[in-house]
Image: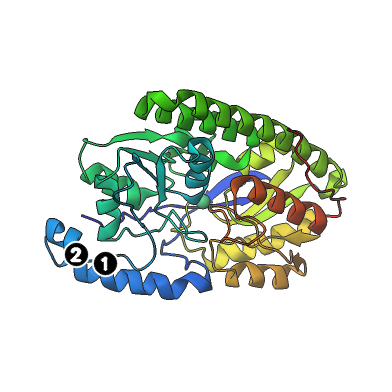
């Protein structure tokens, strides 16, 4: 029941255009720092899966999070991704209890739920998830939990870019938060859902959402200005997986190549790697980028073989950073990414300062 379906096709993007190649799929490892926890979780998960689910709900605890609170009388809201958890916390303030399932640095595409996740979902009054299949394991778990808990696909408030995965399979790109304008639509969806949950707090939610919107409008403008400091012929982004299409479109930087497609379930073939190396040599970028939710080993190899730099900082792609890192909130993650891109591609970075 908790098993995740793996995708069958593989995508790679070269020369600024999407193209697909056939290949085998397997799981890309998440960041080295999360491996131990993940292994531990998998072990617990396997033990728990041997039991009937209701038993597992009492019998197994989750080693890595999902701290669901009890007894403080506040309505429980569960968010799947770290990005949605952060935005929800900002809009909700102290009025509801927000619990995020994924931990910073965890890859949502390949996350395998543990039984404690279903307990958290079942005790929630509202589940906020990204949607467009960003988190297939958690969406499956949510659907299996039945229809009692209200759920809202926050990312689906944004009209998606459509991606061709090959063989005529068109899928929506789930990485909608890449544009700050889109994040405003997400904030509005979160605010609407929270107001429905707790109408007496409407004023507070609306005020928080308005402040956030104001900040994101400034962020949007700032990112645009920052990217424009990169010389035109260097405004090209080569990343590990295809998570920056919305960013690229909003801020006019070409997605010139990715090692893997929109889901990290795929393992690039030697051919894909070679094709990307050749492509990078041709387009002549100064640097390419690793990402915080994906093992950087392969993109490092690509950089070496292509003779280009790997940017010193990784991009926060599908998760905010751990507490205390440069990207530990959505707004900081967008600033950190922009700084990393601007500095690696020869632009001139100036810090973001929001006016209230
Ligand atoms: Zn992704």
Residue at image coords 68%, 60%: 289
**Residue 130 image point, x, y percent:** 44, 41
Q: Is 171 left or right of 87, judged from the image as shown?
A: left
As rendered, which of 308 and 337 lies closer to the eye? Answer: 337
Quickly name the residue at label 1: 45
* The CB of the residue at mark 2 lies under 8 Å from ligand 1: no
**Residue 145 image point, x, y percent:** 22, 45
**Residue 228 image point, x, y percent:** 84, 40
**Residue 5 image point, x, y percent:** 31, 54
Look at the image and name its color scheme: rainbow
Residue at image coords 67%, 36%: 249
Classify mark 2: helix, strand or loop: helix
Instruction: Please say whether residue 167 is visible from this viewpoint.
Output: yes
Q: Residue 49 — which label?
A: 2
As rendered, which of 308 and 134 lies closer to the eye? Answer: 134
As rendered, which of 265 and 193 lies closer to the eye? Answer: 193
Residue at image coords 58%, 53%: 317
* The CB of the residue at mark 1 lies under 8 Å from ligand 1: no
Q: Quadrant of the N terminus?
A: bottom left
Instruction: Find the residue positioned furthest to the front.
Output: 72
Classify mark 1: helix, strand or loop: helix
For residue 311, which quarter of the picture? bottom right
Instruction: Please say whether residue 3 is visible from this viewpoint.
Output: no
Residues at marks 2 and 1 touching, judged by CB atoms closer than 8 Å? yes
Q: Is 343 left or right of 92, judged from the image as shown?
A: right
């Amino acid at each position: 029941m908790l098993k995740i379906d793996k995708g069958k096709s593989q995508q790679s993007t070269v020369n600024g255009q999407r193209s697909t190649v056939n290949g085998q799929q397997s799981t890309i490892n998440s960041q080295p720092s999360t491996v131990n926890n993940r292994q531990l979780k998998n072990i617990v998960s396997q033990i728990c899966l041997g039991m009937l689910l209701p038993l597992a709900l009492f019998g197994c605890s989750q080693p890595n999070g999902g701290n669901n609170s009890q007894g403080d009388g506040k309505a429980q809201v569960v968010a799947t991704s770290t990005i949605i958890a952060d935005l929800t916390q900002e809009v909700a303030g102290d009025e509801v209890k927000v619990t995020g399932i994924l931990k910073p640095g965890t890859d949502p595409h390949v996350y395998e739920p543990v039984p404690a996740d279903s307990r958290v979902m079942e005790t929630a009054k509202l589940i906020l998830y990204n949607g467009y299949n960003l988190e297939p394991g958690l969406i499956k778990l949510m659907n299996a939990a039945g229809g009692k808990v209200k759920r809202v696909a926050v990312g689906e408030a944004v009209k998606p870019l459509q991606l061709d995965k090959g063989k005529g399979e068109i899928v929506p790109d789930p990485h909608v938060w890449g544009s700050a304008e889109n994040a405003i639509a997400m904030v509005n969806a979160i605010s609407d859902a929270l107001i429905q949950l707790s109408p007496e707090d409407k004023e507070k939610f609306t005020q928080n959402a308005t402040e956030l919107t104001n900040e994101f409008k400034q962020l949007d403008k700032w990112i645009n200005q920052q990217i424009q400091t990169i010389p035109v012929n260097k405004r090209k982004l080569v990343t590990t997986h295809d998570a920056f299409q919305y960013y690229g479109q909003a801020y006019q930087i070409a997605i010139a190549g990715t090692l893997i497609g929109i889901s990290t379930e795929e393992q690039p073939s030697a051919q894909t790697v070679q094709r990307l190396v050749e492509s990078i040599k041709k387009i002549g970028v100064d640097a390419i980028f690793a990402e915080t939710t994906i093992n950087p080993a392969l993109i490092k190899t690509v950089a070496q073989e292509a003779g280009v730099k790997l940017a010193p900082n990784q991009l926060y792609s599908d998760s905010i950073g751990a507490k205390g890192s440069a990207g530990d909130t959505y707004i900081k993650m967008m600033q950190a990414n922009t700084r990393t891109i601007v500095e690696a591609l020869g632009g001139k970075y100036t810090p973001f300062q929001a006016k209230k």
